[in-house]
Amino acid sequence: MGGSGGKKGKRMKKLIGTKEFYGSLLMLAVPIMIQNAITNFVGFLDNIMVGQLGTEPMSGVAIVNQIIFVFNLLVFGGFSGAGIFSAQFYGKGDDKGVRDTFRFKIIIGLVIIAVTFFLLICFGENLISYYLTSGETGNHHLTFLYGKEYLRMIFFEIIPFVLVQVYASTLRETGETVVPMAAGIVAVFVNLILNYFLIFGKFGAPKLGVTGAAAATVIARITECLIVIVWSHTHREKNRFLNKAYRSLRVPVALAASIVKKGFPLLMNEVLWAGGVALINQCLSVRSLTVVASTNIASTIANLFNVVFIAMGNAVAILVGQRLGTGDFEGAKDTAGKVIAFSVFCTLFTSFLMVVLSGVFPLLYKTSGDVRAMAGSMIRITACLMPMQAFLHAAYFTIRAGGKTVITFLFDSGFSWLVAIPIIYCLVHFTGLGVLVIYTIYQLLDAIKASVGFFLLKKGIWLQNIVEPSALE
């Protein structure tokens, strides 16, 4: 018994870091956390402002945001493969390697912009209609018109969003998290102020409703983009990867092939995962527009509280990636375990707070009692399972940091499309189960992923250096 207890004690100690460790972790994670928190908080206020216009405007905007969500994750996925290499090149002290990955991101960004323009121009209205195929409550035609109006303006966000991600992601991967945070803070306050002016027509501004909300987002995104780009190019002594970065867009063939090999599964994963989430929401939405509005409120609130484990996921990817780039596998393994444990521990507090406030947030929306009640229940369900999501998120980014992108593809979107989506589709269309029961089952399915993630972490298959010359051949 004593021996067993001693082993458990040793394992626990391995998951607890020193003051220096947590200091370096928080120096990296807190700026990301603050930026995400402020962004999501302003998104929450934005959501409330649009919610004051009624259920149909809120639902129309929510549907378009589901479509834009797929685009956002397409960008993140497109840059993720290069980001793995950036972190390891930076850990190795290879400025040219970071510059080449930066150029690769620019090329991918241009491709994503072109594809997104084509899809939204040709099929944007059809995608909105897809969410309004059936249901018993709500004015579907009015919701469609609001969605169409919002999409027409939010379209102009695409270019500045891609550009800011090219720069901000590379800055984070090279250890600079404060500037992207500061730019994000400025942008969200610009967004918040302009929302108030343009949605409701305050201080002489035109009353534009959902178009005003979209215009505010576009202007805020342009502001963020300008701050990040101007700072980056005026501090080249720190951002050495930008020296001669635009002399050409040439990327070494071997590196480009390696990024594509590692990055394509990540790109497909983000697209398929986002598409899977959108499809599951569409499945639920066929019951009624009440579900559309409720899931919009619940996801907005969840985004306020998940900033801790989102930031920890970004931090573990950077810290582990830099360790792997130097060949310090034991250090990478130790770092991953401590960050994951800390992330889950912190999330216990945020999930408790989320449960306590679950009945308050829906009252801030000008909508029906049914929407408020369902949204409150969804918030509580999400909160109870948030610690598991914290573990999953950190495990995913740890495995990804070692370049095991095919495994993360199967682990994430593969699971969604082969397991979660078929189950939820069948439950929605072929059973009489209530929406909240189906929503709970959907959340609980991630326990399977958590078990697989734990096994993969223990096995250590992700411990590899992918920027050594031999690895790029």
Image (cartoon, rainbow, N blue to C red):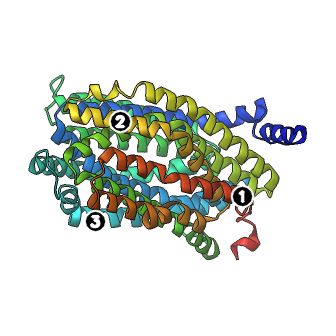
Mark 2 vs mark 3, CA separation in Å: 35 Å
Asked if 364 appears above or below 465 in the picture, the reply is above
The percent coordinates of residue 385 (x first, y second) are: 50, 41
Q: Secondary structure at mark 2?
A: helix
Q: Which numbered disc, 2 or 3, marks the residue closer to the eye? A: 2
State the residue at coordinates (40%, 57%).
274
Tell me the residue that label 3 is attached to.
Answer: 119
The percent coordinates of residue 273 (x first, y second) are: 44, 59
Mark 1 vs mark 2, CA separation in Å: 50 Å
Q: Residues within 10 Å of mark 1 (few under 14, many from 20)?
A: some
Question: Which comes before the other along the chain, label 2 or label 3?
Answer: 3
Q: Secondary structure at mark 3?
A: helix
Q: Secondary structure at mark 1?
A: loop
Question: Which comes before the other along the chain, label 1 or label 2?
Answer: 1
Q: Residues within 10 Å of mark 2 (few under 14, many from 20)?
A: some
Q: Which numbered disc, 3 or 1, marks the residue closer to the eye? A: 3
Task: Pick the residue in front: 416 or 149.
Answer: 416
Q: Are marks 3 and 1 in contact (CB under 8 Å)?
A: no
Q: Amino acid at mark 1?
A: Asp
Q: Is residue 245 visible?
A: no
Quadrant of the drawing holding the N terminus: top right
State the residue at coordinates (48%, 43%).
228
Q: Amino acid at mark 2?
A: Ser
Asked if 377 appears above or below 326 in the picture, the reply is above
Asked if 462 appears above or below 340 in the picture, the reply is below
Quadrant of the drawing holding the C terminus: bottom right
Question: Which comes before the other along the chain, label 3 or label 1?
Answer: 1
Which label number is shown at residue 94? Answer: 1
Mark 3 vs mark 1, CA separation in Å: 38 Å
The percent coordinates of residue 448 (x first, y second) are: 55, 56
Which label number is shown at residue 377? Answer: 2
Q: Are marks 2 and 3 in contact (CB under 8 Å)?
A: no
